[in-house]
Image: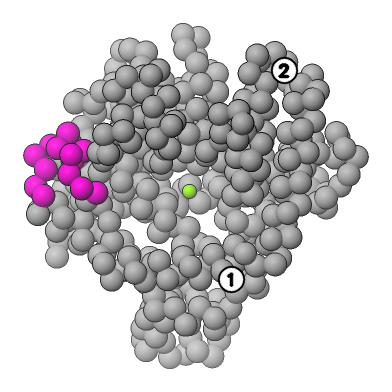
Amino acid sequence: MAMLGGPLAPYASDPAQGRGRRHPEAPAPTRNDYQRDRDRIVHSTAFRRLVYKTQVFLNHEGDLFRTRLTHTLEVAQLGRSIARSLGLHEDLVEAIALAHDLGHTPFGHAGQDVLQACMAAHGGFEHNLQSLRVVDVLEQRYPAFDGLNLTFETREGILKHCALRVARWIEQHEPGGVGARFLARSQPSLEAQLANLADEIAYNAHDVDDGVRSGLITLGQLGDLRLIARFRDEALAEYPALAQGPQRRLLFETLRRMLSAQVYDVIRHTRTALQQHAPADAQAVRQAPPLVGFSEAMRADSAELKRFLMRRLYRHPVVMDTTERAKRVLRELFEIYVDRPQEMPADYAASPLRERAVADYIAGMTDRFAIREHVRLTGTRLFRSTD
Ligand code: MG
């Protein structure tokens, strides 16, 4: 099967046919609209903070673990690579991938759980929606508007999930906008579907790598998983010496083969789905079922790996201990800022929607800034010094 990319496919998103920006702007002389979105994202403040935000392991626990930034770059790499092969718009996939975690709280999912609980009575908190809020409202760099004024297609991709209640709220403020598809139960662009899947492919592989590096899971345990066993056996059959040396090289080769197999599986399966449904253009994609995906077998194997990671890594006692301390840091910060908004920068303190302003402020923090603020405001140090 030929997998190298060619020209843009008819069902790809074409910036010339896009729905544009909320505040009209003249086109850039040398860049298409999705390149321009990508550049705005890379230059944003929220993007730079990703380097000091947790993926699974706290940023300062080791220099070699993924951070939100390196995770984001891996998602962009996988997304672009698959997009090129399928004739999708690489720049759009890249823009969505680079922005997809901008709204992530410090301390990974622990942070999201805390803000969800704290905001339950104040409109809720959800990290996809927060990523959209970052690019729509919170970044303040342009004289004529708040946010980055990204195209509809990039914003649509950033909002990958959305509760119906929230979709109705968005629909009121932006009729026919990025909330509409959740109400109509239609699909986003193929590029958005792809960025979403690239996220999953990236974290499954790199969480295995980081998990083994941390010592919390072993290659031996992973051998019970179909996906890992298959590629480990393949690697050993081709390079029997890998059984003797340090296990890291065997792990790398196993993961490398797994990543490649998943990428090729997505390309093959998606090509077949595109042939079957034959969407005439990017608009027709939205009325079709989801078209970018794994084959049935790969989906089952990937789900098995995900379940393993959930049980053995994300809920490992060592990770849970960090998680509990991280939750306490953010919960206490939330209470203190609601009580004493003057502890926040003036523009947050002045907001009439106090809880929302506090959630925005906390969500934007890096891990180490949250830890420092917590020490400053409570005198209690729950994590070792990060300076
Ligand atoms: Mg992600």
Give me the residue at 42% from left, 37% from top.
162
> What amino acid type should be assigned to the residue bearing mark 2?
Ala
Question: Residue 366: x percent and y percent?
Answer: 67, 39
| Mark 2 lies on residue | 349
Precedes in sequence: disc 2 or disc 1: 1
> Dot 1: few (<14), some (14–19), or many (≥20) neighbours within 10 Å?
some
Give me the residue at 62% from left, 64% from top.
315
Give me the residue at 40% from left, 59% from top.
201
Circle 2: element type = helix
Q: How is the image coloured?
A: one colour
Question: Residue 190: x percent and y percent?
Answer: 25, 43
Q: Is residue 53 left or right of residue 283?
A: right
Q: Are marks 2 and 1 in contact (CB under 8 Å)?
A: no
> What amino acid type should be assigned to the residue bearing mark 1?
Arg
| Mark 1 lies on residue | 312
Instruction: Identify the magenta region.
Output: 277-290
Residue 285 is one of the magenta-drawn residues: yes
